[in-house]
Image (spheres, rainbow, N blue to C red):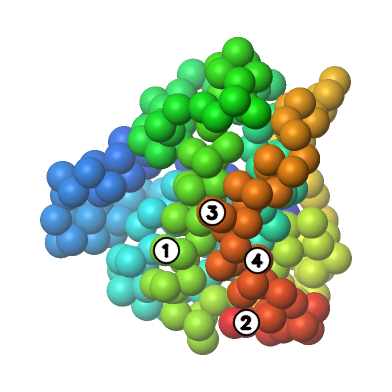
Amino acid sequence: MFADHYRAAHEPNVADLTATVEKVILGELRPPEIKDWLYKRDKELNLEVEASHPLGYLAPWLPEVFPEAKFVITIRDPLPWLKSRLNFHYYKTPEVWQRYRDFIWGRHHIGYQLEEAVLEELGLYSVDAYLTQYSEQYKLLFNHLPEDRTLMLRTERLSDSIEILAAFLELDPTTIIAKHENIVAVDSNVIDLLPTAFVASRIKEKCGWIEERLSIRIPCFERGLSV
């Protein structure tokens, strides 16, 4: 959406970024080392806009390292997010992401329930593993990104939110292009192989807090306000 007019990138230097995130989660880097790494990385990349899923795990340090930066969180409800994630992990297996996948979702995987035995057959993680990671990352973003510098937008409404996005970032809206890339075309949805009631129960237990929060905040989303 930004690449036509700005120095923008989607998940650049994946191997280095994901390896660092792993060290951060494992407690192998001290806060000063994390901040130094972010400063150095920013200087090397020289970007104006970056969209990177793993950066969510560095949310506690991003506001301090980038005091003038603005943050945009894309929000997808648990069910469509899970549907997309299962499809993506099954149909797309880029080697450069495998270690990160095994670490980020594998550390939450403690086995399969009877209703999701098909996920084991497909080489995927448990529903709880996926939803725990989903919940974990949004909590980090909500708890550490400053409200006055953060905008939350529905993922499915990005193309319709350009005016809101441009106003928040103080940019000319004609320089932001409505694009949807990294789309996975599938023959069938993995989530359809799971009992609907089972999936709903796992979402309620693992992600009930965010569904409640989003239901309260939806009017703000629709007005495009930062929250």
Picture coordinates of residue 215 (x, y %)? 71, 74
Badge 4 marks a residue whose secondary structure is: helix
Tell us which disc is closer to us: 2 or 4: 4
Closer-to-camera residue (115/6): 115
Cα–Cα gap, marks 1 and 4: 16 Å
- Residue 203 in view of the camera: yes
Q: Residue at x 85, y 20 (%)?
A: 187
Q: Are marks 2 and 4 in contact (CB under 8 Å)?
A: no
Q: Are marks 1 and 4 in contact (CB under 8 Å)?
A: no
Picture coordinates of residue 39 (x, y %)? 28, 59
Cα–Cα gap, marks 2 and 4: 18 Å
- Is 94 drawn above or below residue 201 in the view shown? above
Image position of 95 (left or right of 19) = right
Residue corresponding to mark 1: 140
- Residue 126 sits in which quadrant? top right
N-terminal of the pair, mark 2 or mark 4, is 4
